[in-house]
Image (cartoon, rainbow, N blue to C red):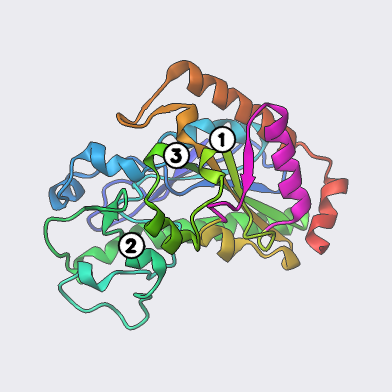
Amino acid sequence: MTKTHKTKHIHDVPPFDLRTPSRCNNPFVFASPHSGRYYSKRFTELSNLSELTLRGSEDAYVDELFGSVTSFGSPFLVANYPRSYVDLNREPMELDPKMFSDLLPSSSNTKSDRVAVGLGTIPRVVSFDQDIYAKKLKYFEEKSRLDDIYTPYHKQLQALLLNAKAKYGWATLIDCHSMPSLKLQPDTSISKKLFGAPPSHGFDCDIILGDRYSGSCSIHLTNILERLFRDLGYSVARNDPYAGGYCTSFYGRPKIGIHAIQIEVNRKLYLNESTVTKRASATKKLSNDISSIMAELTGLDLSNVRPLAAE
């Protein structure tokens, strides 16, 4: 079952779909903050780029790759608006003052590394070097992206995690993403600014698990996920170069029984990256493998998993 969240103002599509199982029977909450693909007429008219170019930062079809999780008893929160319009995996006010003709609120974080390369909550660029907008925006007009989309998404995500924790004693966010293949990665200077150093091997891997260096999720759960992917033949890296974004670091609180881990799927496994189209047979295989992995993960004996909350 899919529930939509109603919104007002300039946004004619709900900020997210909440895909719910007929009965929730495990403490896992899945989310896909970057697979939204509703490119409104207003956005494309504001933009300096084609829709295909804008889609370069989209986690294309990740919601479909993980779509089976509701059949295993887990809710799945899926963004409708694209990452290039509003990035739900950023701080609430991570904004670039160079983008706007008016002043930003004093609460804005204008100094982060992500803002510096144009990847704030309202992004300035896609693919690290292509300006989205032909001219400066007015913040007082664009703040509705935060009010109508960002805030409702995070309120819903927080509610799902708190409900799971209240029911099971612990909860885990599985934040679902995709990453460009090695040939489409940013240059070394940008990588160093974003990731601290050029990645040693992660871009070549099929799967990257980000748990903030074991800070956002029990290492036992990360171990289980790595084993499940490796058992099906996928190469796996941890935290290199993606250790998890805002959602992972903000919601992952293992000491109070809420865990969060980010899964990055290499787009080369299922996507024609230049056209942002699925490769049918490859997508089907990957979807089936992810379904198998998530079925096993969500079916874990809770008596064995429950101690994760006490680590």
Does the magenta portion include 285?
A: no
Identity, as a three-letter code, of the amino acid under mark 3: Leu
Say which residue appears at 56% left-offset and 26% top-offset.
287
Q: Secondary structure at mark 3?
A: helix
Are the residues at dot 2 and dot 1 in contact (C-beta closer than 8 Å)?
no
Point out the residue furthest to the bottom here: 106
Residue at 85% over, 56% down:
307
**Disc sitting over residue 117 in the figure:** 2
Please state the horizontal and vertical placement of residue 3, each as a whole percent of the image.
47, 42
The quadrant where residue 114 appears: bottom left
Give the alpha-carbon distance from disc 2 to disc 1, as whole Å. 25 Å
Residue 206 is labelled as 1
Q: Are marks 2 and 3 in contact (CB under 8 Å)?
A: no
Q: Nearer the viewer, residue 199 or 265?
A: 199
In the rendered structure, the answer to whether residue 35 lies left or right of residue 228 reads: left
Q: Nearer the viewer, mark 3 or mark 1?
A: 3
Tag 1: amino acid: Asp
Q: Assess disc 2: are there few (<14), some (14-19) or many (≥20) residues with their C-alpha within 10 Å of its C-alpha.
A: some
Of labels 3 and 1, earlier in sequence is 3
Give the residue at the far top of this rendering: 281
Q: Which residue is mark 3?
A: 182
Where residue 12 appears, x then y in whole percent?
26, 48
The span picked out in magenta is: 217-243
In the displayed structure, does residue 277 sit left or right of residue 103?
A: right
Residue at mark 2 to residue at mark 3: CA–CA distance: 19 Å
